[in-house]
Image (cartoon, grey):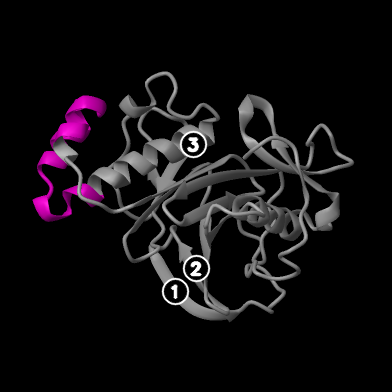
Amino acid sequence: MGQLTASGRDTAYVWVGRDTGGQPDPAAELLCQAGRLLLDRPRAELVLTHGPGGRPLVRASDDPAGSVGLPVSVSRTAGLVVVAARRAGAIGVDVERVRPLPALALARRWFPPAELTWLADRPEAGRAVDFLRLWTAKEAVGKALGQGLRGGGLRREMPPPGLPWRPVPGAEALWVGYPELGGDLVLAVAVHATGQVDVEVVQPTGHGAVEVVQRPGHGVAAVRSASVERTSLPVVVRGNWSSRCSTLGRL
């Protein structure tokens, strides 16, 4: 797939929305917005389906083979839904809320020895966050691979969390990073890539949005306010949110 971003760079887009459990499904709404903006097709011409390997895909209704489909990924945590999309290739995303948990006991049960050792050496006050960074990385990588945590995914070793992108040990051209959402949230994004990939995160807040542009290749994050009425990329909150594209299966 070709690269399609406002700057011409390979970019992973991440949208964050509230999830109240009602209808319409906020994940489907965000996926339709992603397809409309990145595929440049009307919402009525988009469907949500699954591609080879079971990966979620947004494609045009007149393209049943998904030859120009948009790879997407979805994650939910309490009251929140996150959708990621990338024209240039596979992507995975996972989000968790920070909470008290027995990090070392869980790591001893589920994680490989190197990660347990790393986690045990981390400051106790932040150990739950470090555990969740590793956990979300495993989930995001599994989604990018199209296999989730099947086949020992929790035992798949992750690089120590940090920016910029970190290569996943033993996996060719597979990278994981942690864009900042702030508050009590931990977010991981995984991509297949051979070059630099930027990350752009849009998080609606009330009647506006806060757009966080994170460029992992430089380890720099810039934050700026953006109106929901703005129509140029990468701002994605635009158009009629009450309209829906077709849904095939549950994403």
- Residue 213 is marked as 2
Please identify, in this view, whether the residue under mark 3 or under mark 2 is nearer the observer. 2
Marks 1/2: CA–CA distance: 5 Å
Q: Name the element at disc 1.
A: strand
In the image, is residue 12 above or below residue 183? Answer: above
Q: Assess whether residue 107 is covered by the magenta stretch.
A: yes
Task: Tell me the magenta residue range.
Answer: 105-129
Q: Is residue 44 left or right of residue 156?
A: right
- Residue 22 is marked as none
Residue named by callout 3: 173
Of mark 3 and mark 2, the one earlier in the sequence is 3
Q: Name the element at disc 3.
A: loop
Residue named by callout 1: 222
Give percent across and percent down for residue 194.
53, 42
Which amino acid type is marked by label 2? Val
Classify 10 Å Cα crowding around label 2: few (below 14), some (14-19), many (20 and above).
Answer: many
Classify 10 Å Cα crowding around label 1: few (below 14), some (14-19), many (20 and above).
Answer: few
